[in-house]
Image (cartoon, rainbow, N blue to C red):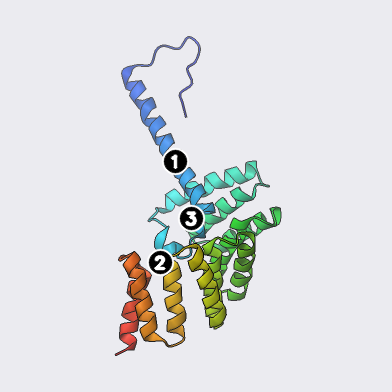
Amino acid sequence: MEAQIQPNAQEPTRSSQKEIKVKSDRFKWWQSLILLVGTLAICLSAGYYISEKYLWNQKDDEIAKQLAYNKTLVEQKPNDPSLRVQLGYTYFLKGDNSNAIKEYQTAKNLDKNFYAAYLNLAIVYDQENRTDDALQMATKAAKLAPQDYKSLLLKARSYRKLKMYKEATAALEQANRFKPGNTDVIYETGLVAEDQGKLKEAEDIYKESLSYDPTFKPAIKALDRIKSKNK
């Protein structure tokens, strides 16, 4: 926010100029944060293992500020589905899945073909273990964006939870065609093998995911789990 110079006001002193610059820098930082959150809400939040890859350690007061800001935006433009998704994602960061779902559903109702609403709903439903609902939303998202691997990945996860391994494998093969070498896709493929008791195959797949990202925590934990099962 730039300082407003009033008519006939005296020239700001050097100290006041520094104060204005500090306030301006702080505001620019806040604008950048909001822009980043907005981008995450619509794009990165669509990532499958969001808690592992995309969330940073935020203080409660920072999330509260984001929530208040996004609420203001929605009040100004209540019929903008992208703002609804952004607000829903902030609720998701806060751990308030109920309100996150409400905002995503509102976005979906505002625009029946709004991809981000369906994908984010699939993510929250999956976290809530509402597997049938997650599958339904992921399937719709996949129809809206056929070449986006994220919805296919979510479909695969839902199919795996429902023990529909053939369908899960088919969805993963599609996802891999669109995003080869993606650690999330490889890891989910390992989970499908592990859930079927194919431990050696699962172990090899988890190791493959680590060849792309040696710090990928889900695969590291999975290998420890496989090791304990083999004892």
Q: Give the residue at x 57% y 69%.
A: 125
Kind of residue at badge 2: Thr
Q: Give the residue at x 48% y 49%.
A: 37
User: Looking at the picture, does residue 71 appear above or below residue 203?
Assistant: above
- Residue 35 in percent (x, y) is at 48, 43
Say what secondary structure mark 1 lies in.
helix
Say what secondary structure mark 2 lies in.
helix
Which residue has dot 3 on it?
Answer: 44
Q: CA distance from mark 2 to mark 1?
A: 29 Å
Q: Give the residue at x 53% y 44%.
A: 69
Kind of residue at badge 1: Ser
Which badge, 2 or 1, is on the more N-terminal residue? 1
Q: Is residue 124 visible?
A: no
**Closer to the eye: label 2 or 3:** 2
The quarter of the rendered structure image containing the C terminus is bottom left
Confirm or deny contact between disc 3 and disc 1 (CB under 8 A). no
Say what secondary structure mark 3 lies in.
helix
Which residue has dot 2 on it?
Answer: 183
Q: CA distance from mark 3 to mark 1?
A: 16 Å
Q: Which mark is residue 191?
A: none
Q: Nearer the viewer, residue 118 or 95?
A: 118
Kind of residue at badge 3: Leu
Q: Is residue 48 visible?
A: yes
Q: Give the residue at x 50% y 49%.
A: 39
Q: Nearer the viewer, residue 137 or 76?
A: 137
The single residue placed furthest to the bottom in the displayed view is: 231
Q: Which mark is residue 32?
A: 1
